[in-house]
Amino acid sequence: GLKGFPDAIRAVFPEALVQTCIVHLLRHSLDFVSYKDRKLVAGALKEIYRALDAAAGETALAAFEAGEWGRKYPAIAQSWRRAWGEVVPFYAFPGEVRRILYTTNAIEALNATLRRAVRARGHFPTDEAALKLLYLVLNRSEKAWKMGPREWVMAKAQFAVIFGERFTRAMAA
């Protein structure tokens, strides 16, 4: 949901597929919902992001919008429609990969660790000093990573099929 972020990513990585975090989209959607309706609305939204493909997802979104929850909380469908361009790439992947792409929580946790380290230091005499600190924090963080998600093996196989040579080059690097 950061303005300009998709454009910045594509400027550096022109072949990148940019997609929004489905978990954040759900959380944002539930911000509009009264507490007693949250579980039911979350269940109704599952039909959208668990759809087989983008067309089925859009049909599910239209059904949600026309249904009880869409009429009661119209801001939800509006927010999904605004983000739809960054939701659609999610549907290009099979279920094994979607479970990995569903959330950016791991990335956010790493970013929080980096921000905490920079904030604790305050300022740096040179850019090189800042880079060294970030390198050390990343090294320490990597040691804490015990295992990847259990779906990663299946996701890697799907990435190899979907991205072919591009994936093979990235894994070799």
Image (spheres, helix red, strand yellow):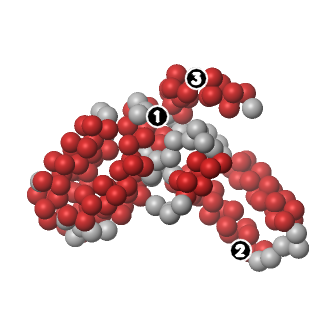
Q: Where residue 109 sits: x, y (%)?
A: 59, 58
> Looking at the image, can residue 10 be seen?
yes
State which mark lies toward you, 3 or 2.
Answer: 3
Q: Can you tell which quarter of the image residue 93 is in?
A: top left
Name the N-terminal-most of marks 2 and 1: 1
Q: Residue at x 31, y 55 (%)?
A: 80
- Mark 2 neighbour density, 10 Å: few (under 14) some (14–19) many (20 or more): few
Callout 3 amino acid: Gly
Badge 1 element: helix
* Residue 119, numbered label: 2
Rendering coords of residue 141 (x, y %): 71, 53
Question: In which quadrant of the rendered image does the C terminus lie?
Answer: top right
Separation of marks 1 and 3 at Cα, in angstroms: 15 Å
Within-10-Å neighbours for mark 1: few <14, some 14–19, many 20+: many
Check the image and report above or below for 58 versus 35: above
Q: Which residue is mark 1?
A: 97
Q: Amino acid at mark 1?
A: Val
Residue 164: assigned label: 3
**Identity of the amino acid at label 2?**
Arg
What element does badge 2 sit on? helix
Mark 1 or mark 3, earlier in chain: 1
Q: Is residue 23 left or right of residue 144?
A: left
